[in-house]
Image: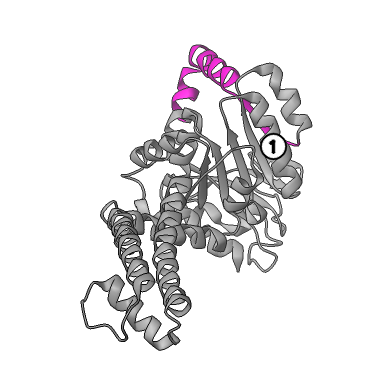
Amino acid sequence: MEEDLKKRIRHVILAFSLVAAVFVFGVFGYMIIEKWDIVDALFMTAMTLSTVGYGLPKPLDYNGYLFTTILIVIGISTYLYAIGVVTSFFLDGDLRKYMRLRRMMKMIDKMEGHCIVMGGSEIGKYVIKQLAVRKHPFVFATPTPVRVDEVKESIKDIMKESDFLYVVGDAMDEQTLTKAGINKASTLVVTLSDDSLNVYVSLMARNMNKGLKIISEADNVTAIKRLRYAGVDNVLSATEIVGSRMASLVLNPALQSFMDIIHQSNNVHLKMEEILVNVRSQLVGKTLNDANIRKETGLLIVAMQNGTDFKFNPDPSTVINAGDVLVVIESDESQSKKLREMAEK
């Protein structure tokens, strides 16, 4: 898509270049053949190419008439080509596409801490849908142009088309990740259809951004180890996840129904959120009981994390420290918003 547009733009530039080249050819032709000065040569060239039909600035000899005839033929042919290319460019909406692409690239350049979703699988589409629901900034990168339209269609009721940012390019080309803002991204989700491609992209991304969190899909369970070696932080196997959930439906049907409600994408009643406690927060130094988070926000704290230390169902006497991550369950977005304000100041 991007390459086709650039090709059309190059055709437009070529058309204008040919018109300019023909004009210069006419000016120098008259100066050399007729020995005219540049003013007379400019006037004669402009009059000839525009087919206005004014009188000649000076009489022409045989060579001059022959050159003028050739100039008219070349000029008309070049004009017709240029008019066709430019008209096609505007009527086909190429200018609008070009402006949209420029605007999109500028928006991506300004992004920081966003997520890049690389690939075009169904899993990748679902990831994008979840990110759109949660309003998390992301860039979709895919080697398959048709996948862009499919993803747009799947999230058209969730976000505006103008806010959907994407890059089309070869997954094995560093430029694709560069255009997607890999240097300032916080997370990369790799959902390509081939495990070997997932490994290659993960290696490339890790080399381009050492602090990047990489999450990859694995079609084959045997590829999990290779992806780990490639620097992937989290590897998820669709086979394992589906098998695990099927077993849960048999063993713990009520728990599985509860998890389905939390992860439901279309009508979210409950959501899990992470809240980072800032060093300046009023919560620092207080216990969970003294902080009155449940009373103030209505949120249920299910876990606390500090570095690699993870506490599930923390005791009310647990002290909140700067840098702690509070994992909560909310039923309304305003709840986590209030806690974020408390955690930041």
**Residue neighbourhood size for the residue with mark 1, other residues' Cα within 10 Å, grouped as few (<14), some (14–19), many (≥20):** many
**The quarter of the displayed image where residue 204 is located:** top right
Instruction: Judge whether residue 145 can be spotted in this image.
Output: yes
Question: Where is residue 119 drawn, in percent x and y?
Answer: 54, 35
Residue type, numbered disc 1: Ser
The overriding secondary structure of the stretch rendered in magenta is helix
Identify the residue shown where x is 41% and y is 67%.
22
Please say if 276 is above or below 341.
Answer: above
Question: Where is residue 229 drawn, in percent x and y?
Answer: 79, 30
Instruction: Single out the residue that lies furthest toward the left.
Output: 53
Question: Where is residue 118 drawn, in percent x and y?
Answer: 56, 39
Identify the residue shown where x is 70% and y is 40%.
311
If the image is split into quadrants, where does the N terminus sit? top left
Q: How was the colour assigned to the protein in this rendering?
A: one colour
Question: Where is residue 84 drawn, in percent x and y?
Answer: 29, 55
> Total of numbered circles in the picture?
1
Is residue 331 located in the magenta-colored stretch of the structure? no
Where are the magenta residues, as a range? 231-258
**The quarter of the displayed image where residue 76 is located:** bottom left
Q: Nearer the viewer, residue 36 or 216?
A: 36
Identify the residue shown where x is 50% and y is 58%.
105
Q: Nearer the viewer, residue 315 or 37?
A: 37
Instruction: Judge whether residue 134 can be spotted in this image.
Output: no
Q: Is residue 116 left or right of residue 122?
A: right
Is residue 238 located in the magenta-colored stretch of the structure? yes
Please say if 10 is above or below 253.
Answer: below
Instruction: Single out the residue that lies furthest toward the right.
Output: 229
Please say if 134 is above or below 222.
Answer: below
If the image is split into quadrants, where does the C terminus sit? bottom right
Q: Nearer the viewer, residue 109 or 343?
A: 109
Identify the element where label 1 is drawn.
helix
- Identify the residue position indicated by label 1 in the image: 202
